[in-house]
Amino acid sequence: MNLMALDVGTKRIGVAKADSKVRVAIPYTAIEVNDGQEFQKIASLIKAWGVDGLVIGLPRSNEGRETKQSAYVRQFASQLRSYVPDVKICFQDESLTSVEAEKRLKGRKKAYKKGDIDSEAAVIILQDFLEEKVGGNGKTKAAAVKRKSVKGRKSRGWVGFLITIVVLLALVAGAAVAYYIYSLRPVSDVNCEQEGLDAGDVCESKEFAVETGESTSLVAKHLKEAGLIRDEIVFRVYAELNGRKETIKAGEYQLKKTMSVEQIFDLLLKGGDGVYSYTVLPGQTLKEVRQDLIDLGYSDADVDAALVNHYREAEFGWIFEGTPEDNTSLEGYLYGDTYEFFKDDSAEAVVKRLLTEFADIAEENQLKEKFAEHGLNMYQGVTLASVVQREANNPEDMAKVAQVFYNRLAANMPLGSDVTAKYAADQLDPNREIYTDNAAVVAIDSPYNTRKHPGLPYGPIANPGLSALKAVATPDGSVAEMLFFLTGDDGMMYYNSTESGHNQAIIDHCQKLCNVKL
């Protein structure tokens, strides 16, 4: 049976194919979504390949629920049926396959395009389908015929049949367990401490490298190719059973054939030589990231050169849409996450990785399109998200704070954000030698200070996290009438539609925080 899989997106459709007998999915390409022409292209491929079954990835949330994208995929499948009425269409539940696909591609250390990610995602969808649905789970036509024939037997025949099945299953299970235990053992049982032993290269350490982003499956494959484990599937199962499948760390390792799977896996969890982890937190400023990189050992000159925005022509350069030409700051775009880098990676390589991650998150969450629905370009959306990030204490309040800011913009009111005034003061007078009190800070004449100037600040004031970005993309309409908010001394957010109500909330709930030095 020839199978084809589709990873359906709003811009591209990843394609993969496989023969169910071989059960190995192969990436083909990605088809651009273009006014319905994509249906004709898919139909042509189905005819050319003699496809018997079509597998379409059905996105689900982390909780297993269908999403808006799921509805889009179902609608796509419904339209496709009219082009290929004789081909059976199946859905395969999937979640974050594009993220996993990109990890695989990054691990291969080769250049790739966005379409490659989509086709690799289709491979994952099809491979999962092959393993779950075509993997001998008793649902084949032959199995169904066999079950039907058994129904006519006498009860005595049933008992004998069941006993036979139970015995066979027990034997198979026992053999599987025995093989699993055997495969966990070292490739060689040679005692390297024995005097006078000529063991060849068995007792010698072998260099083994794990690249950044490599999956457990890929690491297992390379270990098997290097002769360091007996069975790559057993290694993957061991990793899965130990609940640490995605914790293998990149780096360079010294491994021996006399090491067991447990010893190798534990070593891979600790991390190899030549690699370090670096965490950027949501809400950090460019100044703080700069100091982090210098503390990691990069020179001031290298860091400063890397943090100047000369990346607008890069593949991810679209994230800077709307940025003024004279603004070369990367403030707001160094996405907060934990990363692993090789110690010989340059400062610019580190910065590019952070920017690429931001672009991936932005594309995955359709931030450009959603910002545009509110009249903002990417630069404006990131700018507002950075203010929301610094204003709100928790993700639950961010969407409401974003809505209040939208309300004020619509009413031609200044945002009136203290955090923007503080950022302006930090830029002009970090040691507070000039602006010594809050009244002086909020009166600073800076394009970043929204207490003094209407509209958005000149640019981002910090790195917004995903919650703040999504809050600006999808604000909470339940506070559509509110124009004021504050964080009370109890940590709660209080919203008001009038200035008098806001002032009363300050008296009632904000005697300490509202007087904190900016």
Image (spheres, rainbow, N blue to C red):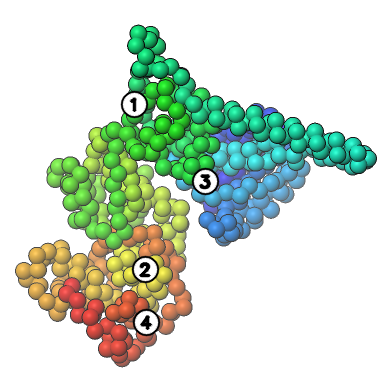
- Which amino acid lies under the numbered mark 4 shown in the image of this protein? Tyr
Nearer the camera: disc 4 or disc 1: 1
Q: Is residue 26 visible?
A: yes
State the residue at coordinates (55%, 58%).
Answer: 63
First in sequence, mark 4 or 1: give its number: 1
- Which amino acid lies under the numbered mark 2 shown in the image of this protein? Asn
Q: Which mark is residue 421?
A: none
Question: What residue did someone put label 2 on?
Answer: 394
First in sequence, mark 2 or 1: give its number: 1
Report the side of 389 relative to 131 (left or right). left
Mark 3 Cα-neighbour bin, 10 Å: few <14, some 14–19, many ≥20: many
Question: What residue did someone put label 3 on?
Answer: 97
Report the side of 34 relative to 359 (left or right). right
In this orientation, which residue lies closer to the viewer: 305 or 184?
A: 184
Mark 4: which secondary structure? Answer: strand
First in sequence, mark 4 or 2: give its number: 2
Mark 1 Cα-neighbour bin, 10 Å: few <14, some 14–19, many ≥20: some
State the residue at coordinates (64%, 37%).
Answer: 130
Marks 3 and 1 close (CB-CB < 8 Å):
no
Nearer the camera: disc 4 or disc 2: 2
